[in-house]
Structure formats: C-alpha cells, structure tokens
C-alpha cells in the first residue's frame, strides 16, 4: 500500500464538561546526540535535514515504560496538589509496555499507591489522544471523578540499530494529565478518532503477538523491531493533519486564529512544518520539542503540553489543538478548551 487513504466516515463529536487539572512530564537523563549516532555510522547531517532532530533521550537498562510513566504521573499529581488516593482511574497510552501481560498501567497504579481501575491503550503514536478521549468519556459520564491519563514509551527498546533511517527518529519519554468535571465551556469542543487498517503494514512491529510469536527465525530477520515505510507515512500524516484539523475547527465553529497552541505529534519536524505551511498556521503557535527529544510516540503530546504549560504559554482558558497519528494507521485530533 503506497498511498493510504483517510477514512472519511470517522465522525466529529463534542464532549465538554471536563477540566484539565494539571500536567506533568518526564524524560530520562541520558542525552543521545546526532554526533553520538554518527560515531556508530549514522549520517548526522541527514538526520537533522530530514527530521529536524538534534538529540533524543534513552532510558537506562533498568528503566521500563512504567517507570517513565510513573515519574511523569508523580509530577502531574504534585502540580495538581491532590492525593494519589483521590485518583479513581488510570489509563496509559503506550505501545512499549513492560511486558505483554499485565498492563503497564497496573504497575503504575501500584507504584503510586492508587486504588483504581487501570489499563493500557495501544494506539501507538495516537495512544495519548485515544487515552485522553477515553478518560474524558469516563469523567463526563460521572464514572470517574479524577482520572490520570498518561502517554509514555521507551522506543529505544523497539527500534532497529541497523535501520539507518528509522533508528535516529525515536526517543524515550512521557507525559501525564489529570482530568475532572468542569464547565460546559471546558473539554473537547470537537474531536475525531479514526483508523485505516489497510495501512497497518506501513508502520508495525511484526513479532511478539499471536500472529508471529517470538522465535529465532523471525528474530534473525529483525521482526522484533519497529518497521516503517517512511515516504507514504509522511504524505499521509501531512494530509491527515490538514483534513482533520480543519474538520474539528469547523465542528467547533472556530478558526485557526482562535487556537492558542497547536500541539501536534512530534514525529518529524518536516511533517509539522509541511502541515503548518499547508494550513497557514502561525509558526509561533506550534509546540516544538522534537529537536530535543525525537519522536516519543504516545509521550509526545503530553510532554509538549506540559512544557508549554510550565513556560506559561497555555493554561486555564486556553484553546489547544492536539493531533496524534501513527501505526494502525490510527489518529486522534481534538480542540480542547482548558
């Protein structure tokens, strides 16, 4: 499949009455620069020119995705000034779970001393948006009073060091938000979730599930690592951002000028720039940290959102456009009023 098409049947919906209470994020200490990768045979100039990435973070061997998620969640809880015992729902968006079973969210719940339901959402780089919208449904329905939503991935464990084009793109990190009941003016002014499974093989990690269980032959071929056909995914992502952002803005009866900040999945600086140019988005309204962290998958959006909040760029009353997209092919785009 060279040119994936968007599913035009994905509805645009509204879900208000949900408040974003606080944000938090975490990245490992180890910085891996393009120069570090060049010493391993990678082309540092190619990395910068084709992706806009200067460096990324890698977790140490003893650190797993749940540890990254826990650290981000702790900072979010501290920022909110609430007790962990007040949280009644934990949702973790990730595709690099600690292990296939149980859900890494259960380990996070235990690490934080939370007595609550906990589960993972696997939608790859769209994982945080899927998790955020799922948690908002719980809060709006009154079945959660304080929901912890996390996006985190340890991509360094899933990428092939022999893949010169894909390996430099990814880093490790995560972010978290807390949600509670809010006013009718807060929450999802418009959102869409979608998927196009016809493009599933363009971005996948073939081995480790029931279709290709772990085996020596597949491991010798590198099937345990993430595979990406970059060119069609790039074109799809740019088109996706253009179409879905305009769709949610129309549903919310808003324009680009009404948005305070665009927090788009930090997959590649060229994707973000191409989409922004196509839509004539003010570059000053783009949250950008892909240059420092690379693609952190489900951690991408909440990490950028937390940085923007801590910098005073957004806060209560702000209107934020968020869009996550990736393997599946899956996506989630929303207009959120803080």
Image (tube, grey):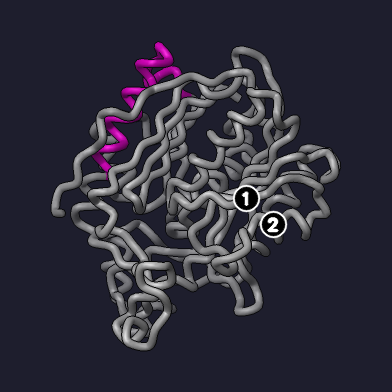
Task: Say which element carries label 2.
Answer: helix
In depth, the one of 69 and 271 nearer the eye is 69
Q: Magenta segment, principal secondary structure?
A: helix
* For residue 334, side relative to residue 231 (left or right): right
Task: Say which element carries label 1.
Answer: strand
Report if residue 111 is visible in the image: yes
Q: Position of residue 304 (x, y in %)?
A: 53, 45
Q: Quadrant of the C terminus?
A: top right
Compared to 138, does 330 lie above or below?
Answer: below
Which quadrant of the figure has residue 316?
Answer: top right
Are circles 1 and 2 on residues that touch, CB within 8 Å? yes
Report if residue 292 is visible in the image: no
Q: Position of residue 235 (x, y in %)?
A: 21, 47
In depth, the one of 158 and 172 nearer the eye is 158
Total labels: the figure holds 2
How many angstroms separate mark 1 from mark 2 (CA)?
A: 7 Å
For the point 63% across and 18% down, which residue is it? Answer: 17
Which quadrant of the figure has residue 309?
Answer: top right
Q: What stretch is highlighted in magenta?
A: 237-259
Residue hosting label 2: 106
Residue hosting label 1: 119
For the point 33% across and 29% down, which residue is it? Answer: 10
Q: Which numbered disc, 1 or 2, marks the residue that appears first in the sequence?
A: 2
Which quadrant of the figure has residue 223?
Answer: bottom left
Q: Position of residue 45 (x, y in %)?
A: 29, 69
For the point 32% across and 58% down, which residue is it? Answer: 51
């Amino acid at each position: 499949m060279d040119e994936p098409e968007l599913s035009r049947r994905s509805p645009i919906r509204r879900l208000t009455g949900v408040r974003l209470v606080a944000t938090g994020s975490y990245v490992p200490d180890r910085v891996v620069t393009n120069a570090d990768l060049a010493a391993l045979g990678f082309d540092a100039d190619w990395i910068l020119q084709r992706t806009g990435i200067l460096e990324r973070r890698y977790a140490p061997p003893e650190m797993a995705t749940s540890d990254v998620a826990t650290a981000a969640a702790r900072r979010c809880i501290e920022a909110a000034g609430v007790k962990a015992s007040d949280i009644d729902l934990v949702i973790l968006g990730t595709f690099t779970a600690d292990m296939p079973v149980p859900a890494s969210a259960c380990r996070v719940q235990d690490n934080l001393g939370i007595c609550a339901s906990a589960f993972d959402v696997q939608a790859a780089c769209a994982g945080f948006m899927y998790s955020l919208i799922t948690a908002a449904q719980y809060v709006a329905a009154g079945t959660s009073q304080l929901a912890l939503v996390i996006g985190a991935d340890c991509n360094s464990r899933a990428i092939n060091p022999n893949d010169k084009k894909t390996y430099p793109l990814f880093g490790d990190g995560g972010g978290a938000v807390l949600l509670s009941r809010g006013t009718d003016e807060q929450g999802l002014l418009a959102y869409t979730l979608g998927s196009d499974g016809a493009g599933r093989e363009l971005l996948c990690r073939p081995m480790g599930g029931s279709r290709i269980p772990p085996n020596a032959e597949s491991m010798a071929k590198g099937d345990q690592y993430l595979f990406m056909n970059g060119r069609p995914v790039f074109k799809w992502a740019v088109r996706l951002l253009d179409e879905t952002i305009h769709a949610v803005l129309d549903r919310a009866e808003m324009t680009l000028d009404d948005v305070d900040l665009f927090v788009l999945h930090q997959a590649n600086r060229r994707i973000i720039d191409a989409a922004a140019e196509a839509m004539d988005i003010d570059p000053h309204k783009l949250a950008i940290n892909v240059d420092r962290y690379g693609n952190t998958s489900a951690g991408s959006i909440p990490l950028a959102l937390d940085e923007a909040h801590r910098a005073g760029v957004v806060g209560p009353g702000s209107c934020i456009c968020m869009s996550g997209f990736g393997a599946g092919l899956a996506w989630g785009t929303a207009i959120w009023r803080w």
